[in-house]
Amino acid sequence: MMKKRILLKIGSNTLTKETDQISRGKIEDIARQISKLKNDYEFIIVSSGAIAAAKQFVKLEHNGKEITVKQALAAIGQPHLMRIYQENFRELGLFTSQCLLSYSDFEKPESKENIKNTINVLVENNFVPIINENDTVATDEIKFGDNDKLAALAASLLDVDVLIIATNTDGIYVKDTIHDSKPQTIPEVMNIEELEKEISLEKSSHGTGGMESKMQAARIAKKARIETWIVNGLKDNFILDAIEGASNFTKIVV
């Protein structure tokens, strides 16, 4: 039986659990769920968090532009982030691999073919590819979208079945209920234009994206006939609960 392929996008807010440092507990939670699902699903992860990983233990002296400092922080934090992934996944018998990409890679046919072939080999050999933008040479993720667009481009290229975007809300809320004690989640939608009318333009505390960038990602995925699920990654078991229909989240169907 063919396994279903999920691309899981995890932003900085999810990885830090909205604190000032990477949460090992959250990465362990993700690893535990992938371990439980590995017989039926194969996972590719697009992960932010390199800058957050660096910020928790280093403060750079500099006279440069803010964007250059963030690139330097990403260079410091990326190996630490991967080490945390590797340690937590290994404890559950999972192997990890690092793939650093940039948006320009998706514009070159040869690069796209190389990305696809490499990641397919990794997945076939039971390695979980962990993708991040190569911030040292590219600044799109830092500036524009907390890896949402990168996740959608990767999902399209890698023929995934579902793009799961982990965020800090139970999906997208009905706009009129956002300030209620129990905001109402929009469970399923096909028309992204209608959904965009409900979103807030606010950006999250650590991440550079907001729901707007997630809508842009959903558009890319929809064009490739891939469902997008927007789920609350701060909750334990968020992947399992979404698959089992045991949580509130937004599903953008094709």
Image (tube, rainbow, N blue to C red):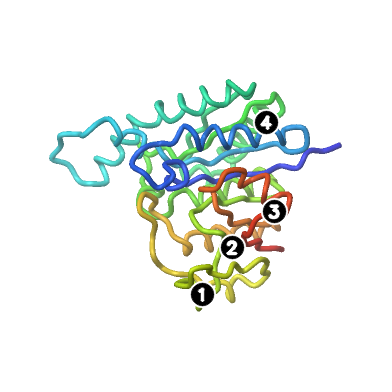
**In this figure, which residue is indicated by the disc labeled 3?**
246
Q: Regarding mark 3 in the picture, which secondary structure is present there?
A: loop
When the figure is inspected, residue 69 is found, relative to residue 188, above or below; the finding is above
What separation in Å lies between label 1 and label 2 (alpha carbons)? Answer: 24 Å
Name which residue lies at 53% across and 72% down. Answer: 196
Q: Say whether residue 64 is left or right of residue 27.
A: left
Labelled pair 3, 1 in contact (Cβ < 8 Å): no
Name the residue beneath numbered marker 2: 219
Contact between marks 1 and 2 (CB within 8 A): the answer is: no
Between marks 4 and 2 in the image, the one whose residue lies nearer the viewer:
4
Callout in the foreground (2, 3): 3
Residue 156 image position (x, y, % from top left) = 64, 50
Q: Quadrant of the C terminus?
A: bottom right
Measure the C-alpha gap from mark 3 to mark 1: 21 Å
Looking at the image, residue 135 sits to the left or right of residue 221; the answer is left
**Callout 4 crowding tier (Cα within 10 Å): few <14, some 14–19, many ≥20:** some
As measured in the structure, the alpha-carbon distance from the residue carrying label 2 to the one carrying label 3 is 26 Å
Mark 4 belongs to which amino acid? Answer: Ser
Among the two numbered marks 4 and 1 on one chain, the one whose residue lies closer to the N terminus:
4
Quarter of the figure with the N terminus: top right
Q: In terms of sequence position, does the residue under pointer 2 or pointer 3 come before the other?
A: 2
Residue 35, numbered label: 4
The label on residue 177 is: 1
Q: Amino acid at mark 2?
A: Arg
